[in-house]
Amino acid sequence: MIEMSLAEIAEVTGGRLHRTDGSERVTASVEFDSRELRAGGLFVALPGERVDGHTFAAKAVADGAAGVLAGREVDAPAVIAPPVHGADGGTSNAMALAGDTDGSGAAVLAALAKLARHVVDRLTEDGLFVVGVTGSSGKTSTKDLIAQLLEPLGPTVAPPGSFNNELGHPWTALRADASTRHLVLELSARGPGHIAELARVAPPTIGVVLNVGSAHVGEFGSREGIAKTKGELVEALPSDGVAILNADDPLVAAMASRTSARVVFVGESPEATVRAENVRLDDQARASFRLVTPQGSADVTLSLYGEHHVGNALTAAAIALEAGTDVEDVARRLSSAQRRSARRMEVTTREDGVTVLNDSYNANPESMKAALKTLASMARSGGRRSWAVLSEMGELGTDSVSAHDEIGRLAVRLNISRLVVVGDAAAPMHTGASHEGSWGEESVLVPDTDAAVALLRDELRPDDVVLVKASKVAEMWRVADALLEGTELEGTE
């Protein structure tokens, strides 16, 4: 963050000073986890389901924090955020914080957003390049690729993992300081207006919409409803900005009419400005293609697993080209780019040759299909047995049964050797697989992750390939961790 006094922070956020004259200066990062604070940092006190950050305020300052941003009075120098009321200050869409019984959490989030906007505005005047990424799937992987392509051009800030909501978004923006040249942000939404609100926190120079899928369709009602909200990002772009849109997704391509910014289409479509030609996969489902752009062409060989990363790579390429990188450098950097975020197509091979594809961070119908296709490709090229260990995809509303059924049927059509469905919420996957073709014992429904682990330990054979995937609520990483626990591993990525 840029250096500011507590008095300046109070003025920006509309807060009041408490137990201080405001002269203390924040010279380090803003943190809501007191364990991450450094001397001179700002501690953000938030209520939680088990603990309340306000109770750590005095200790945070004693440990070196310059002060606290709080929602109520604390025993430490602080800026007390003003209360929020409904739509006041654009906070009507603020995330609900467990334990926020007195509204102090909402007040702190609103103040944090104002502080982030102030910092971003100051840095943008000095040339900060802000990229916003949204989409139903692939946001985190694409954000990681974009960051890796921009880093050689100057200091770059991007969120760890999926910090993409009303807390993670301003927290990431506040990691930027006077030396930062690029700020890459994810934007997620649980309902209409959320992306527009996040875009006001850190106005993007470039906006990316990757795809419109079925994630959160339970909240939005339809894919068209999702598209309306995702398009809030391109509507937020300035006229001298750039919208990067997926030409292969009709709902995304149609967003070109919703922005005054210049539009760059990416994809495999001949109409795409930045496109991939001659896409092919190796025996590990890693894609190679010819990158074709108005500035020239070059060959790319990705080290990431799955054909779905081609679209992510094209998006990153388009942004790097906008930032001034030449095509050959873009291709070279894409070819050397690595996975950075955990539990997203994290591929590890055990000593016995069993390969585990840990894609357990989250899931929706589109990402589930992409993961299954990757599994099938890896198994088919090596003549190996394939296992899909899957659990529920959340927030699908009335489409939940049919979406899970479709995934089970796809597993059969892709000739997956064994399907292990975990938990009653995902049971329609098992039903769909059992009704598709002649499948019988190839699909099994187990009650929980412990049962899945026990089954796999009994029946896995050397050189099998295992995909583990579900929405976060299912905690399927427990299965992947158990399969790899205590094993001398060979990381393949």
Image (spheres, rainbow, N blue to C red):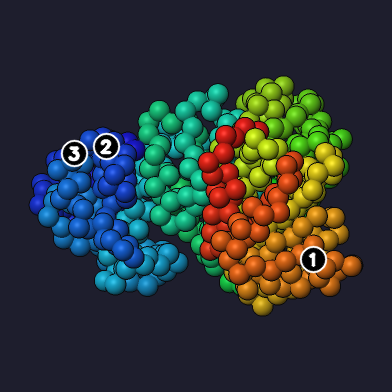
> In the image, is residue 186 above or below residue 80?
above
Given the image, on which type of amino acid does mark 1 rest?
Glu
Q: Position of residue 170 (x, y in %)?
A: 41, 49
Residue beneath the point at 57% across and 57% down: 476
Residue beneath the point at 84% across and 73% down: 435
Query: Which quarter of the picture shows residue 92?
Result: bottom left
> In the image, is residue 426 above or below residue 231?
below
Given the image, on which type of amino acid does mark 2 rest?
Arg
Q: Quadrant of the N terminus?
A: top left
- Whole-Å distance between the Cαs marked 2 and 3? 7 Å
Q: Which mark is residue 64?
A: 3
- Circle 1 sits on which residue? 441
Q: Position of residue 84 (x, y in %)?
A: 31, 67
Q: Position of residue 80 (x, y in %)?
A: 21, 57
- Whole-Å distance between the Cαs marked 1 and 3? 61 Å
Q: Rate crowding at label 2 as few (under 14), some (14 to 19) or many (20 or more) other CA atoms within 10 Å.
A: some
First-in-chain label (1 vs 2) = 2
Given the image, on which type of amino acid does mark 3 rest?
Gly
Q: Rate crowding at label 1 as few (under 14), some (14 to 19) or many (20 or more) other CA atoms within 10 Å.
A: few
Count the numbered circles shown: 3
Q: Rate crowding at label 3 as few (under 14), some (14 to 19) or many (20 or more) other CA atoms within 10 Å.
A: some
Q: Are marks 2 and 3 in contact (CB under 8 Å)?
A: yes
Residue 477 is left or right of residue 377, and the answer is left
Residue 330 visible: no
- Circle 2 sits on which residue? 38
Q: Secondary structure at mark 2?
A: loop
Query: Which quarter of the picture shows residue 264?
Result: top right
Residue beneath the point at 81% across and 36% down: 283
